[in-house]
Amino acid sequence: MTFAATILTLYPEMFPGPLGVSLAGRAREEGKWSLEAVQIRDFSIDKHRTVDDTPAGGGAGMVLRADVLGEAIDHGRTLNPASPILAMTPRGKPLTQARVRELAAGPGVIILCGRFEGFDERIFAARGIEEVSVGDIILSGGEPAAIMLLDACIRLLPGVMGAASSGTEESFEQGLLEYPQYTRPVEWEGRTIPEVLRSGDHAKIAAWRKSQSEIDTRLRRPDLWERHEDARVQSASGARHEKKEPGS
């Protein structure tokens, strides 16, 4: 099954962009995923191809019209009927690696890219759209965020990454940041690769990497560390509960 990406955008020429090179580009050439960028203006209802209007109640900027967006989304569904519809917006739920894995395991995505002051609010409930944010930042449009989301999904598709372990040992996959990486030369500007990584003792190396992941996560991302600790406590509590049940 090919992972199909349908992008609804005012700037289809921005795609595939970076997704046309490296791993994603090769994977597309090999038929592991497909891309169709749809021009939202094609669904405007006047000769000027208008897609936006002034905010109800007043205010600066322009808002993308629900009637135009609705037609564009309905068209996207005909191209990609089984896929979820995502809108890239800073108001959305933060994207996580867990959600990326869910999306990558599915048939594909329909991504709605905003511009101006955003979308007419009515479109979200009317079309069952999932609002997604890639961070607490403001971009000029949803296209760069869509590229980021697709890149995260495509690299997880079967056969895209060379080594199967490449995806599972990286940041966020185990709820922790990835451990520090080193390569040759052994010494550079007076700094050496940690001795344990040169020891050849795989058990010690694994223990060191786990410890470093925990230390870095605790210091750099206390929010992730707190969630990791909560999950570990809940897992331990569940295991104890299961042990008690047979004798109850």
Image (cartoon, rainbow, N blue to C red):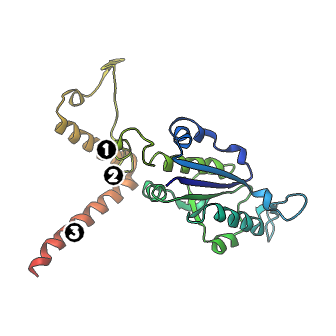
Question: Which residue carries the number 2 mark?
Answer: 174
Question: 202 above or below 186?
Answer: below
Quadrant assignment for the C terminus: bottom left
Contact (Cβ within 8 Å) of mark 3 with mark 1: no
Query: Three-letter amino acid code at disc 2?
Result: Gln
Q: Give the Cα separation between the discs numbered 3 and 1.
A: 23 Å
Task: Please say if 2 is above or below 16.
Answer: below
Residue 152 in percent (x, y) is at 49, 48
Q: Residue at x 84, y 60 (%)?
A: 50
2 and 1 marks in contact (CB < 8 Å): yes
Q: Which residue is tagged 1?
A: 213
Left-right relation of 221 to 129? left
What separation in Å lies between label 2 and label 1 (alpha carbons)? 10 Å
Q: Residue at x 72, y 55 (%)?
A: 115
Residue 20, located in which quarter of the rendered image? top right
**For the residue marked with disc 1, what is the amino acid?**
Ser
Along the viewing direction, whichever of 182 and 102 lies nearer the viewer: 102
